[in-house]
Image (spheres, rainbow, N blue to C red):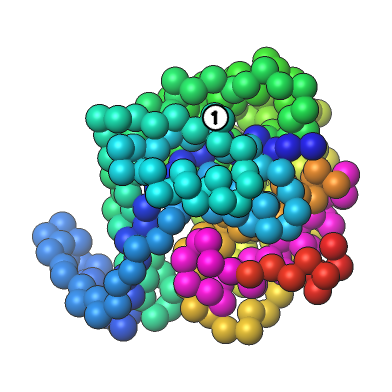
Amino acid sequence: MPALICGSLAFDTITTFPGRFGQQILPDQLHILNVSFLVPDLRREFGGCAGNIAYTHHLLGGSPVILAALGSDGANYLSRIRDWGVDTRHIMTVSDQYTAQAIIITDTDNNQISAFHPGAMQEAGKIEVPQRSDLAVAIVAPDSRDAMWTHAHQLAQAKIPFIFDPGQGLPMFDGPELKAMIDRATWVAVNDYEGRMLCDRTGFTLESLSRLSHLQGVIVTLGGQGCDVWIKGQKQHVPGVAASQVVDPTGCGDAFRGAVLYGIEQGWSLVRCVELANRVGALKIACQGGQNHVIDRQALGL
């Protein structure tokens, strides 16, 4: 059954700084910060959380349905998604806006500095969650503030179980708002930094959050160290998978979430879902961009 993926579609301009940010930024001078990074390598990729998640989900054999907004410059992106055979009926084109744009600089330690222009994404809240009986699961991934709030509530009203994945959108919401979306979710997925911020704003600990009666699990990703899965107050660590090489971390979290969605669709335990997701994340980080990795389903035992 299809999975509904609510989130952003964007173009990523990705550059590489052949040094360390920490050697260029003086901590005691942040109040007068004026830094320019020389980035010899530059490329443009298809990106955005919804696009990246759907790409991996599709490669694994899932049936993603994307709910997102593109701008007037998004025709080639829409064509690309259609070439995957993915349902695009719920992608809206906003004619007087550009598609969302991310500008990302990565240093040699895989730290990233990003700037983001939301463009058409600001209108995504106008797209309604479809009334479809075939949707097995959904995810609310980073999007405009209005879209994340609206789609979380609409999914709950439609009784579609969903992953709340606030990501970089988390700072847009205060504690009561985050609690309201958590109250409507079935799972929560964050990285370790987002997990600390989520707990700080809501007053939960990860343990107490996972004990909420309606939640089936909380996933906390830890980069190369793997992830922690919290279920009803119990934590299980799932070790990371070593990558063949570390090339580009852009979109690793999205690839991970695409794999988790696939596992949930198959009825797997959450731990088995993240075991697959860790393997997929290792494949993604060995490739540039969020939508260029290749998945051998047979090698993954699928």
The answer to whether residue 108 is seen in the rendering is yes
Indicate whether 98 appears above or below 184: below
38 left or right of 209 in image:
left
Q: Quadrant of residue 284?
A: bottom right
The answer to whether residue 210 is seen in the rendering is no
Per the image, label 1 sits on a secondary structure element best described as loop
286 magenta-colored: yes
Q: Which residues are magenta?
A: 267-293
Tell which of 94 and 277 is nearer to you: 94
Q: Residue placed at 35% from the left, 63% from the top?
A: 44
- x and y percentages locating residue 94 in the rendered image: 34, 30
Q: Residue placed at 16% from the left, 70% from the top?
A: 36
In the rendered image, the quadrant that contains the C terminus is bottom right
25 left or right of 62 in image:
left
Residue occupied by mark 1: 90
* Amino acid type, label 1: His
283 magenta-colored: yes
- x and y percentages locating residue 140 in the rendered image: 58, 36
Q: Residue placed at 58% from the left, 69% from the top?
A: 293
